């Protein structure tokens, strides 16, 4: 058991260490001290109150997208549609928050979340039904739907719902009663507490409930799970929809707490949903690992905002490090799923033999 946990920790740390090592070499080639640059990142994101609260704010949607992806991945269901579900939920919540007037702020925010969750659920329902009842590959369907949703929202935000008074493409800002405002002199909003509460609920479901045990069983042996009465079709539907609902909460919270209106870069690059996949892989699909990975990844983002101010290194170096982590984690994921390195070793042994 200890060896298994130790291997998981090493597999999580190794891609990060490699990414930071290569990033450090690049920083050195640019003529700066890597330790000084990394020191600025750590100090400004995790050792100052404004940095800590900003890190928590940026980690909020990442916690949710990370746990949403893990819900399905642990059951060998590859819901790649988190990004599309998030942006659709956030977009519709933003439209509701800007066009519908409700004097009571609590009610307005709750209804925005209801709209965002409902829309994300509706979008997640398509691949869920196709996978559960028609055995259509959910990975392909969700990837295609992400692209389709991006194009639909691009059209809606540039024509139907475009804010005519703005100099660039965006929807009208949500009304004040629908916004999460900064708490005191911090850099975070009440959405931090909302996301942490949802994260804890989903973590409890994954680790302490019958559904959580079913997820493990489906992931390890779906045929056996079905034969023993776990009703994998119902579980697939449940997991896909639950994952979609969590994505809708992430998108709505991001809209009401951070963006307040929809733009074509609403989710950032590569996107909060794709960042969630990186966090899920980095956290090895365990709630504790996802929590640590989300805070770490968010700290990178917070630190990147300060690197250009306090060092001679452009803040794009953080994007390079993030890209390297994605590359190494992808290789690791493919190896674990398809045994790439074992196959290469076998081919080499066959040639030598």
Image (cartoon, rainbow, N blue to C red):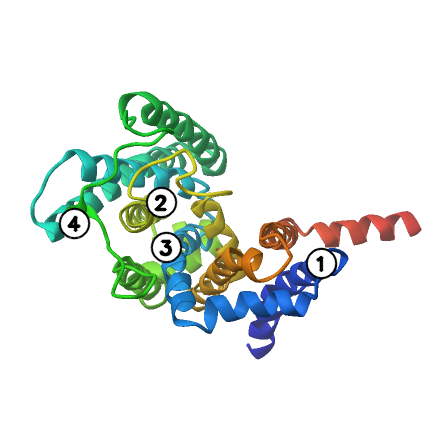
Q: Report the mark closest to the observer, 2 or 1.
A: 1
Q: Which residue is mark 4?
A: 110
Instruction: Please determine whether, in this image, residue 230 is positioned above or below residue 44.
Output: above
Judge from the rendering whether residue 195 lies leftward or rightward of residue 303; answer left or right. left
Q: Report the mark closest to the observer, 2 or 3.
A: 3
Separation of marks 4 and 2 at Cα, in angstroms = 23 Å
Point out the tag, 4 or 3, that comes first from the N-terminus.
Answer: 3
Nearest the viewer among 68 and 183 is 183
Kindly check if marks 3 and 1 are in contact, taking CB atoms under 8 A apart as contact: no
Point out the tag, 3 or 1, that comes first from the N-terminus.
Answer: 1
Q: Which residue is mark 2?
A: 240
Which residue is found at the position 39% from the left and 40% from the top?
266
Which residue is found at the position 64% from the left and 69% from the top?
36
Separation of marks 4 and 3 at Cα, in angstroms = 18 Å
- The crowd level at tag 2 (other Cα within 10 Å; few <14, some 14-19, many 20+) is many
Separation of marks 2 and 1 at Cα, in angstroms = 37 Å
Which residue is found at the position 40% from the left and 59% from the top?
59
Separation of marks 3 and 1 at Cα, in angstroms = 29 Å
Residue 293 place in picture, x, y as percent? 49, 63
Separation of marks 4 and 1 at Cα, in angstroms = 45 Å
Point out the tag, 2 or 3, that comes first from the N-terminus.
Answer: 3
Judge from the rendering whether residue 272 lies leftward or rightward of residue 114; answer left or right. right
Check the image and name the residue furthest to the right: 352
Nearest the viewer among 151 and 201 is 151
């Amino acid at each position: 058991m200890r060896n298994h946990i130790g291997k998981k920790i090493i597999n999580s740390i190794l891609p990060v260490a490699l990414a930071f090592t290569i990033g450090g070499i690049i920083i050195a080639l640019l003529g700066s001290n890597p330790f000084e640059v990394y020191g600025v990142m750590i100090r400004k994101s995790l050792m100052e109150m404004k940095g800590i609260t900003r890190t928590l704010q940026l980690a909020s949607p990442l916690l949710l997208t990370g746990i949403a992806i893990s819900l399905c991945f642990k059951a060998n269901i590859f819901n790649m549609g988190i990004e599309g579900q998030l942006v659709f939920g956030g977009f519709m919540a933003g439209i509701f928050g800007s066009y519908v007037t409700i004097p009571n702020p609590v009610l307005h925010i709750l209804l925005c979340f209801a709209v965002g969750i409902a829309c994300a659920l509706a979008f997640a329902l398509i691949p869920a039904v196709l996978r559960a009842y028609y055995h259509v590959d959910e990975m392909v369907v969700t990837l295609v739907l992400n692209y389709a949703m991006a194009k639909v929202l691009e059209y809606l935000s540039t024509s139907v719902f475009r804010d005519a008074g703005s100099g660039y493409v965006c929807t009208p800002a949500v009304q004040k009663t629908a916004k999460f405002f900064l708490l005191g002199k911090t850099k975070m909003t009440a959405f931090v507490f909302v996301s942490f509460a949802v994260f804890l609920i989903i973590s409890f479901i994954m680790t302490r409930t019958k559904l959580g045990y079913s997820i493990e069983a489906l992931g390890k042996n779906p045929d056996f799970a079905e034969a023993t009465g776990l009703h994998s079709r119902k579980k697939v539907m449940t997991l896909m929809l639950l994952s979609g609902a969590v994505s809708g909460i992430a998108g709505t919270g991001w809209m009401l707490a951070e963006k307040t209106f929809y733009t074509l870069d609403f989710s950032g690059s590569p996107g909060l949903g794709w960042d969630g996949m990186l966090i899920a892989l980095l956290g090895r699909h365990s709630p504790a690992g996802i929590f640590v990975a989300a805070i770490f990844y968010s700290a990178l983002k917070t630190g990147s905002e300060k690197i250009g101010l306090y060092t001679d290194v452009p803040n794009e170096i953080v994007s390079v490090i993030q890209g390297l982590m994605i590359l190494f984690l992808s290789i690791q994921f493919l190896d674990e799923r398809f045994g790439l390195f074992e196959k290469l070793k076998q081919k080499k042994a066959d040639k030598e033999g």
